[in-house]
Amino acid sequence: MTSNSEDIETESVHVVVRVRPLNSKEEMQNCQNIISINHEENIIALENPKLPNMQCKSFKFDHVFFCDCTQLDIYQKVALPIVDQVFKGYNGTIFAYGQTGSGKTYTMSGNQTDNELKGIIPNTFSHIFSQISRASNEKSFVVTVTYVEIYNEEVRDLLSVHPNEKLEIRERVDVGVYVRGLTGFTVDSINAINELLQLGNSTRKTRATLMNNLSSRSHTIFTITIETKDREHNKTTVAKLNLVDLAGSERLKRTEATGIGLKEASNINQSLFVLSNVISALVEEKCTHVPYRNSKLTRLLQDSLGGNSKTAIITTISPNENDYDESLCTLRYASRAKLIKNHVRLNIQTNKGLIENFEQEILELQKRLEQISMNEEIKRQKTRKGKSQSKEILKRYTEQTKEFKNIENVKSELNRKIQSIQNKILVGGKNLFDKAQEQVFLLESSFEEIKNLDKSHQELQELLEEKEIEHFDLQEQYSSLQEEDKILDEKIERIQRLLERVKERHDEQRQEHRQELNRLFEHHQTTSRELQLTNELTKCAIPKNNIKIIESNVAWNSEICDFQVNGIAHVGNNMKKPKRRFKKHIPKSALMGILFNERKNVMRANKVIFKKCAVKNSYQQYVSQKKDEESKDLEEIEDSDDTYP
Ligand SMILES: Nc1ncnc2c1ncn2[C@@H]1O[C@H](COP(=O)(O)OP(=O)(O)OP(=O)(O)O)[C@@H](O)[C@H]1O
């Protein structure tokens, strides 16, 4: 077997944890569960029963399964991906590791009579044969099985007629590590492979201990080798799947083992100790030597740990508070094993494989059969020709008939051989199940399909919900945009109407201003003329000096809107003394008289003047007021744009 170095992939060992439920004995003793699980993060936390206030010890794995998980859950998450890879030509290993009584055998083998309780090994059988029956008929497969146990550091063949015979481990460059003299069986159906498993299990060493009524006293490796010949791509691959059920580690104090039990337990612990050393060495960066050779177990699992294999370790633990130390130790090793890197490559068959050998054998047998048939035919013809001749010939004929019978027997034996070899080569697409098996498997696969469908249904449902939310959002956005658009239209319309109104008002006001301006202008002209006349009249009526005196002594009172003589109160007739500013040489009475009369005249005249002036002022005020109003209107328009809802 060869494979290009470029094809080598480095990948970590897949490590999962399975927690078994508390058993009835533990429940009766009221033992506490010290394990909690975070399924989303795949974290398992262990509470120290002696120090409940201390923080839990937690470990992260590729997957964690709690007591309620089913055998099929484990198969789908752990074994199925590896079995699929074996079909592609990659080696695979699945092994259960854990304390005695933690559920390794339950996980690997389970209860064979109950479909739901079947473990990884029987489920793998169904998976393999269903894959073959679903494959293209351009593919041929040969499935072979071996089953070994390592008991007290001795390798034994569980399928051999001499199961107690010790076997040796050897290594060859082209094959790798192998067990010499191991019996391999080619299987063509689930029944055939199941029978071999049962046969092996019946020989496996088990014993009742204080920790487990049916404790495995040996490590077992059930190996399925699948050779696949793909005629379409002219490629043959051969891959091994090791299904390993280890014996559990045990504290001798707790199991109180003695005699053979003690020897078994010491050997089990010793080989598990080597296994943990191998794991440690593999993950240590500076380590140059991995002690695979220190135990038979690690020697046989050499390829699975750090070698050419896709490996999954199922760490089984007990939730019982009394098993805290063992569980912690198991989890520590398991989390270390996660760091092991394997170097996986596609195993392409370059020399003659089983399929080719079988095919050649069939051809040779068929040729022999043809030759025998031809010889037989010639002999028969000769016999027919000599039928009517002498008695002697008749005697020979009887002998020849006997010979023909023998030939027939040889022929049927050859046909049987051909058939049995042909049966070993499984052609893709062929139905390999008998009715009952098919139903069982269909039940399992439909269960699997239902699960997958459920999953995809759930995913689709979630997607649909997401899309619906998006749709609602869009609709909301769309309707709010439409509303906004409508509101904006209305706003524009209203602003336009407002603008038109303002324009109209503005035009009207302009018109009014003009008219008012004209009117005021005319009025102003008339007033100016009148003022001019009044001035002329005043000049005639009042001497120039007096006018000056009057002018310097009167002031406009804005409160009463009239002229007032400075210093004289105009309340009734109570006029007060004028201020001393008047010149002394003018007699007071005369001045008063003049002043009084003239003041009256002047006041009248000035009132007129003032009024004219007031009109002029008010005209200017009016103009500026109008300007203000116009600018206010414009501001109003501008404001209305900004402040509109
Ligand atoms: N997940 C589980 N669900 C239900 N029962 C279980 C589970 N795991 C183990 N058990 C039960 O616990 C008992 C011990 O299990 P099992 O024999 O598989 O342990 P083990 O790890 O193989 O022990 P040992 O190393 O001694 O062989 C069995 O009765 C088995 O049915």
Image: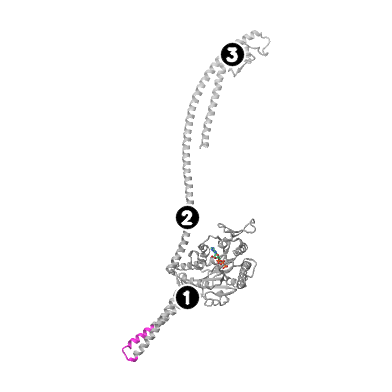
**Dot 3 lies on which element?**
helix
Give the number of the mark in front: 2 or 1: 2
Asked whether mark 1 and ligand 1 are closer than 8 Å, the reply comes as no
| Predominant SS along the magenta part | helix
Which residue is label 1 attached to? 356
Mark 2 to mark 1 CA distance (whole Å)? 47 Å
Q: Locate residue 231, reporting x and y percent.
A: 46, 71
Q: Locate residue 522, reporting x and y percent.
A: 51, 20
Q: Earlier in the sequence, mark 2 or mark 1?
A: 1
Q: Locate residue 328, reporting x and y percent.
A: 62, 62
Q: Earlier in the sequence, mark 3 or mark 1?
A: 1
Which residue is label 2 attached to? 460
Q: Is residue 311 visible?
A: no
Graded by Cα atoms within 10 Å as few (under 14), some (14 to 19) or many (20 or more), the crowding at tag 2 reads few
Left-right relation of 99 to 399: right
* Residue 387 included in the magenta stretch of the image: yes
- Decide which of 227, 212 is in the foreground and name it: 212
Q: Is residue 414 visible?
A: yes
Picture residue at 56% right of the left edge, 14% below the top: 534
Which residue is label 3 attached to? 602
Q: Badges 3 and 1: C-beta atoms under 8 Å apart?
A: no
Graded by Cα atoms within 10 Å as few (under 14), some (14 to 19) or many (20 or more), the crowding at tag 1 reads some
Left-right relation of 334 to 518: right
- The amino acid type, in three-letter code, at marker 3 is Val
- The amino acid type, in three-letter code, at marker 2 is Leu
Give the number of the mark in front: 3 or 1: 1
Q: Identify the image's colour scheme: rainbow, by chain, secondary structure or one colour.
A: one colour
Mark 2 to mark 3 CA distance (whole Å)? 105 Å
In this picture, which residue range is highlighted in magenta?
A: 374-392
